[in-house]
Amino acid sequence: MAYIITLSGQLGSGKSTIGKMLAEKLGYSFYSTGNMQRQIAARYGVTTLELNEMCKTNPEIDREIDSVLIDLPLSGQNYIVDSRVAFHFIPSSFKVKLNVETVIAGERIFNDTTRSGEKKYQQLEDAVEALISRRALEVERFKRIYNVDIDNDYNFDYVIDTTYKTPDEICDLILKRFEKFKRSLEVALKQEETDC
């Protein structure tokens, strides 16, 4: 049986860092819609914030990203997926949401020199303001397109605040909860087989 862990949360919550660490620890493949969005933004010659604005009138951009998410479970491979809305497209996944205080998220983005395709901010306040704007656009867009609230914690199997935890602590917590998720899923599948 293939397993998929989907990681949702706002920019700066640690999705990419945690996703890559989990993929390495578990030997799973890693997929990031953020990377795909940055590639699409570069193709259009815009920032990711501008791409989010473009998505309001260009639904084909979302469809391009969504089609990849929908097809991932069909591959039969284990995946860690860094995506704000993958939990919706892969309902059988172990759905994790990473929360973070907005100012801390802004600091992380402001100090991150590895983000390609992202705007470089002159001041921390600019990064925080852009973060708030981008999140508002995404929440509105996903509600309008999918009737899904990406900020609603009830959509997830596990919600964790990453503000004051190290990546190792976060990974350990997720892995412990994931083991419980796998055991309960295996029990449910055995029960189904018995009932048939």
Image (cartoon, rainbow, N blue to C red):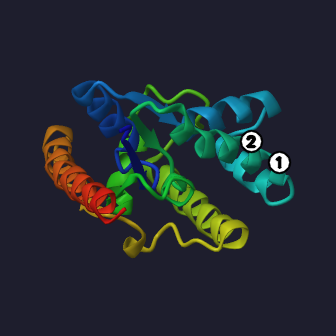
Q: Which mark is residue 6?
A: none
- Residue behind mark 2: 64
Does the rendering let one see residue 2?
yes
Secondary structure of the residue carrying tag 2 is helix
Q: Position of residue 190 (x, y in %)?
A: 25, 55
Q: Nearer the viewer, residue 32 or 129?
A: 32
- Residue 42 falls left or right of residue 82: right
**Image quarter (top left, top right, bottom left or bottom right) of the N terminus:** top left
Q: Amino acid at mark 2?
A: Glu
Marks 1 and 2 sit apart, C-alpha to C-alpha, by: 6 Å
In the rendered image, the residue lying farthest to the right is 57
Q: Residue at x 47, y 33 (%)?
A: 76
Q: Position of residue 180 (x, y in %)?
A: 17, 55
**Image quarter (top left, top right, bottom left or bottom right) of the C terminus:** bottom left
Q: Nearer the viewer, residue 135 or 189?
A: 189
Label 2 packing within 10 angstroms: few (<14), some (14-19), many (20+) = few
Q: Amino acid at mark 1?
A: Glu
Q: Is residue 144 above or below residue 99?
A: below
Task: Answer with the quarter of the image where residue 3 lies.
Answer: top left
Q: Residue at x 49, y 30 (%)?
A: 115
In the rendered image, the residue lying farthest to the front is 196
Label 1 packing within 10 angstroms: few (<14), some (14-19), many (20+) = few
Labels 1 & 2 near each other (Cβ < 8 A): yes
Does the rendering let one see residue 120?
no
Task: Answer with the quarter of the image where residue 53 lies.
Answer: bottom right
- Residue behind mark 1: 60
